[in-house]
Image (tube, rainbow, N blue to C red):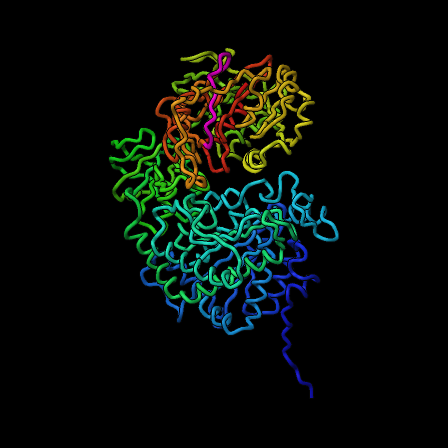
Amino acid sequence: MCLSFTVFAQTPSPDEFLGYPLGSHFTPHQKVVDYFKKVAGTNKNIQLQTYGKTYEGRELLLAVISDASNMAQLEQIRKYNLSLSNAEKSPAKVAKQPAIVWLSYNVHGNEANSTETALRVLYTLAEAKDSNTKEWLKNTIVIIDPCLNPDGRERYVSNFNMVSGKVPNPDPSAREHSEPWPGGRPNHYYYDLNRDWAWQTQIETQQRLVAYHTWMPQVHVDFHEQSYNEPYYFAPAAEPVHQDITPWQREFQVVVGRNNAKYFDENGWQYFTKERFDLLYPSYGDTYPLYNGAVGMTYEQGGIRAGLAVVTADGDTLTLKDRIDHHFTTSMSTIETVSANAEKLVSEFKKYYEQSVSNPPGIYKTYIVKAQNIERLRKMAELLKRNHIAFAFGADRTLNGYNYETQKTESFKVDRNDLIVNLQQPHSVMANVLFEPQTVVTDSNTYDITAWALPYAYGLNAYAVKEFITGSHSFIEEKKESIPNMSKPYAWVIPWNTIDDAQIVVSLQKQKVKIRIAEEGFTIGGKAYRAGSLLVYRTENEKINKDLSKILTTVAKDHNASFYPIASGYVEKGKDFGSSVYRLLTAPKIAVVSGQEVSSQGVGEVWHFLEQELNYPITMISTQSAAYLDINKINVLVLPDGSYSDKLGEQLSGWISAGGKIILMEDAIGAMIGKKPFDIKKKEYPKKDEKETNERRYSEKDKDDLQNSIPGAIYKVSIDQSHPLALGLGKYYYTLKTDEKIYEPLENGWNVGTLKANSYMAGVAGDKVKKKLASGLLYGVQQSGRGTIVYLGTDVLFRSFWENGKQLFTNALFLVN
């Protein structure tokens, strides 16, 4: 007789699986993934979900953990929870709805302790050896994301392992406590993933937010590290706190904070609350959940670049094991607090979404975005979809509303393709935060920008209305013009309205098609074409391309575009097609400077935009290589924000004179001031009045100097619409200004974008800053020999969500001569 037994493998501890004590080494990402899979394979109360991969192909995963009874009905629990977030009136109930707590670790790669902590939290919950842990899991579903940024973390861990010795060196000056450029903080494209939650420009965020919206937790904690000389921070948060955050959300932060404090007090560990880390900017790992009904919190352990051990300014030695202990304690303390308040959390979550529908926040009840530019409107609609914000199009009505451009209440007509966001919807809070024209800021001491209204970011005029307006259509009406059939056109016209049109230029230039730009508008065949229209002349192209017609047909189809055939070179209004105003475009051969002197964020924004959005080939070079450019191989050089050497400008002068185009972004301009051939000058201000005294009190030392502060405000830039740099932007361009730098108008050049009186639109900007920014140049173009210098005085690619700036940057690359 043969007896059979079911044998369950024992769950290995992190130490047993890794082969070293947790905290004695940094664990590579693949080993983290392997451990999660091993533990999930030995425990039926853990469900592992792979939600995507990073740019470098590393796995992104979640572990979902609870007790057996909850895991047996996990899908019903998830669906019921989603029904609450949709404010459904009669959701299908489950026997007892647990609260969902989501723990996110290591969004910044060099804040590397928290992934190690995740291993310990997983094991502790999987084993659930004590009665307390067992009880907590009865009332909670715990979701663990062990590493939001594997590419950045691997960059940090790999470098640390490469430069550290046999024994950790706690001396802060040891090389293991420094990181080579660009550091481990950002992802593959050097983006800060903790500022990307709402915008979802990066692949890690896009995939994570899909997973997040399938669960919609009641509590979300984002685990970070700060300077190793700092104690631990946990909620409650500092001011400013956005006015749409509810009293309950603020109250529960206090409840959690007190429980965390209890354990820290027992151990004598130092901590602080209510300082530095505010709740305003909508794209953080604490604010995004808060604007989506959860209680979002940030926890910060001292430890950036601390390695395995470091001597702090106080003379103590902080170890990786210490840091793990602290994050582990707040992880478990939070689960305990969520469990004790599970019923209340679920009840408040349900109420949050019911009130979102019945009584949306804010003074405005509908936001209406004009369809001035269909492609940018379409991209805004895609962003709203990713954030689960409902919208519609068109309503045959005339209304009164706040005009974002004039900042006055005016009458306007709603057109067929205008986008309408009615706040009577579950995600009204998030919608209101993204659209509100003026963010109410109760304290200037904010950690990030203070203005981000989508109409400004997308360069689309909009109106905020105090009544609920319902859209009549669910889709944009496509208005395709009838195109005449010509066997042998003189030329074809290609519109230039958005960055998508640059993709057409790229496709045609790859196939050696010559393209011209109309620097002035013209009328032919009764149809008016704007300045900036692109033209393909048949005869000059057929000399090198016998299949021109076939190429144009294929490219138009691939890009869902229309090319308009023109019968003659003789126009009814404007210049005939033989005029010099129809300039031949040169295909850009682009290099981007990167390295120690350059802002990694600035490099990443350019790199990501060209590679991921335009799919355009670029060469990344060092500042040393920039001094030896070959005009035949590189004809466009981009200098992102940075502090460059005094010699670089002079070294580039010959290349520019030979026909090169250099694009200087933000502080790259400052590095060239006073150097030949750059004519730009920083605007000087009157010296401080001798009678003016410093009246700041010592007690205000940790607060921003409000008069001189501009953490991120929106300004209206007056545009020279006739210049190629400005094509497609309209009369104004709205920029996010994060500093007080501004320049004198060019004496020998084109002042394309300038600030004038009353240019300030939204966000925090101190009185002294406003005076400095009352007038001056932000965007300009200068000729030098056969070459061109483009000055971009603000971050036009800001975090990749400032959509209208992409148009300006694309113009600089492709259209500016």
Residue furthest to the bottom: 1
Q: Is residue 533 visible?
A: no
Front residue of this view, candidates 642 and 456: 642
Q: Is residue 154 visible?
A: yes
Q: Is residue 347 above or below residue 438?
A: below
Front residue of this view, candidates 59 and 450: 450
Q: Is residue 747 magenta?
A: yes
**x%, y% of residue 226?**
55, 47
Left or right of 746: which side holds 774? left
Front residue of this view, candidates 321 and 485: 321
Q: Main secondary structure of the magenta part?
A: loop
Residue ID at (30%, 32%)? 403
Q: Quadrant of the N terminus?
A: bottom right
Q: Is residue 110 magenta?
A: no
Which quadrant would residue 605 be assigned to in this image?
Answer: top right
**x%, y% of residue 585?**
56, 20
The magenta span reads: 738-749
Left or right of 48: which side holds 647? right
Number of numbered tags placed on the structure image: 0
Front residue of this view, candidates 626 and 382: 626
Q: Quadrant of the C terminus?
A: top right
Residue ID at (31%, 45%)? 422
Q: Is residue 167 above or below residue 55?
A: below
**x%, y% of residue 527?**
39, 20
**x%, y% of residue 218?**
42, 58
Residue furthest to the right: 166
